[in-house]
Amino acid sequence: MEMSTHQQSFWNKYIFSTDHKVIGMQYSIMGIIMAGVGGFLAYIFRYNLAYPGQSIPLFGHLAPLQYNAFVTCHGMIMVFWVGMPILLSGLGNLLIPIMIGTDDMAFPTVNMLSFWIFFVSALVLLTSFFVPGGAFGGGWTMYPPFSAGGYLNRNPDFFKALFSGTSLMILAVALEFVAMLMGGINFVVTTINKRAKGMTAFRMPIVVWFLNIASLIFMFSVGPLVAGAFMLLLDNVVGTGFYDPNRGGDPILWEHLFWFFGHPEVYVLLLPALGVLAEILPVFARKPLFAYKPIIYLALVSAVLSVLVWAHHQFVSGIDPRMATFFSIGTILISIPFAGIFLSFMATLWGGSIRMTVPMMWAIGFIALFLIGGLTGLFLGSNTFDIYAHDTYFVVTHFHYTLFPDVFFGFFAAVYFWFPKFTGKTLNAALGKLHFWCTFFFFNGTWFLLFFNGLHGQHRRINDYSSFSLINMEPYMTFEKISTICAILLILSQFIFLYNLFTSLAKTKNPELTKNPWHSATLEWTADSPPPHGNFKVYPEVYRGPYEYSVPGEVDDCYAQNVPGPSFENNENL
């Protein structure tokens, strides 16, 4: 059946667009912009850690309260305004409709509205830097009493309390969650109701499965935090005492509400990135994805376990040791499904005809770095070790080895893989490889040595370690300087990507060269490059699974999902 098309004005096509691809690009562009803000904040406080008290190029002197605010906002931005838009919302909007063979999201107008609410949330967050008192500086987890009681303790005036840095950050987070909820509902409804003929649940690409599972995790875990954030805002604006123990409140309540969402949030970011790997590895190994159905079952198990382990973030909060043991066991158990997924990826590569393209390099780099983050997470899952390592640089380094590969390596793998399809143009491969190697080496240079600082007891959230007199700080400061130099080089390396991006966008479109440059089997590669509004001229029909590469006994290297012929079902779902 042919799809209908209609002409769009500039504003309807590029600004207030209901086209899922444009909205996906808007989320991605906004995420890149916010990554620039978060990266600049990191440069400032990292420089201060290596050279405390000195004037920072492009900024000046950093006051202690500014240091706290910059560290706080860096964490908030990178998790909620970079990771969420570029992985969940950006990839979900770009990929889900076209990979399941439909024209758009189930609710296009709601989809457009979700982006603009997200855009407003980013403006509200950035505004908090310029209000009296500056941005909130009590840590990105916003623990009371730092984040509560602003009305009673600092701002007895209602409007001053409402427009404080603390209140604006809470409001920004609330708006961002509303936007993500709207998008997540759209993803799930679209996937359930708008799949192409023949696109059964177990013929969907893994990335579509993982984007939907991530959306469901978000929707089921965010509710308590939304309620908790509303109570926190009331504490600051009208003087309630939900988190004030002097008036019957409980500051630990916020920790439970925050981490009941905050830990599943890790998997909200991880699963889309793993979905990207599941699309890239079979293409460049020329093999079907190993254990297609078990991977889906393992992801569903991990989704359930993700909401049962939140209190491993609270081992030093006075938790009953018997409960701590329960959460330790749960934390170790959740590593099992992800170990199974990674072993499936390794089996996919085993014996394959591997092509080391730029997307493949980012995918393998993701695996290498994330394994370090995952294995160190097992140590921290033990309440006995966590009591020692808590609030040290060991935790911070583990956190970055977990989230940086998810957010950035997963995102760059996706960009280098799908850029030809959605733009009709090609990125420079040599610049892509240079970008990868610089990012890989400088990231390790930034963080690996700080594992040792953490194991020796160096605590985080301190702006000047040089004045400590109780211990010899010289080894710490040496590693801090190496980390800072590598961090600056890591940030500068991203300009290679930006240069590659802008120069490639200036090229002339080449629809034939970019329609299916990787010889992939999934539906998006059967559409024109770039896909028009509506994606397909004719609704596709699906005849087989998404990973039919190098089928034994067959001549063709791969079988596209929409080409009539034999149904191998991912080589019997090995």
Image (spheres, helix red, strand yellow):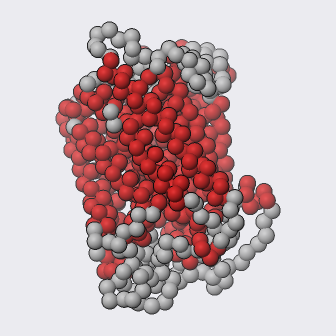
Asked whether, in this view, residue 173 is left or right of residue 108, the answer is left
Residue drawn at 47 percent across, 80 percent down: 561
Residue 363 % position (x, y): 41, 58
Q: Is residue 164 above or below residue 96?
A: above
Q: Nearer the viewer, residue 398 or 200?
A: 398
Residue drawn at 33 percent across, 22 percent down: 476
Quarter of the rendering occupied by the N terminus: bottom right
Asked whether, in this view, residue 61 is left or right of residue 486, the answer is right
Asked whether, in this view, residue 206 is left or right of residue 100, the answer is left
Residue 4 % position (x, y): 71, 78
Asked whether, in this view, residue 346 is left or right of residue 24, the answer is left
Residue drawn at 31 percent across, 80 percent down: 572
Question: How many marks are shown on the rendered structure?
Answer: 0
Q: Is residue 477 visible?
A: yes
Quarter of the rendering occupied by the C terminus: bottom left
Q: Nearer the viewer, residue 356 or 341?
A: 356
Q: Nearer the viewer, residue 388 or 43?
A: 43
Residue 191 % position (x, y): 51, 68
Q: Is residue 503 above or below residue 293?
A: above
Q: Nearer the viewer, residue 521 or 296?
A: 521
Quarter of the rendering containing residue 364: bottom left
Q: Is residue 240 visible?
A: no
Residue 186 % position (x, y): 56, 60
Quarter of the rendering containing residue 290: bottom left
Residue drawn at 59 percent across, 53 percent down: 500
Q: Is residue 172 above or below residue 405?
A: above
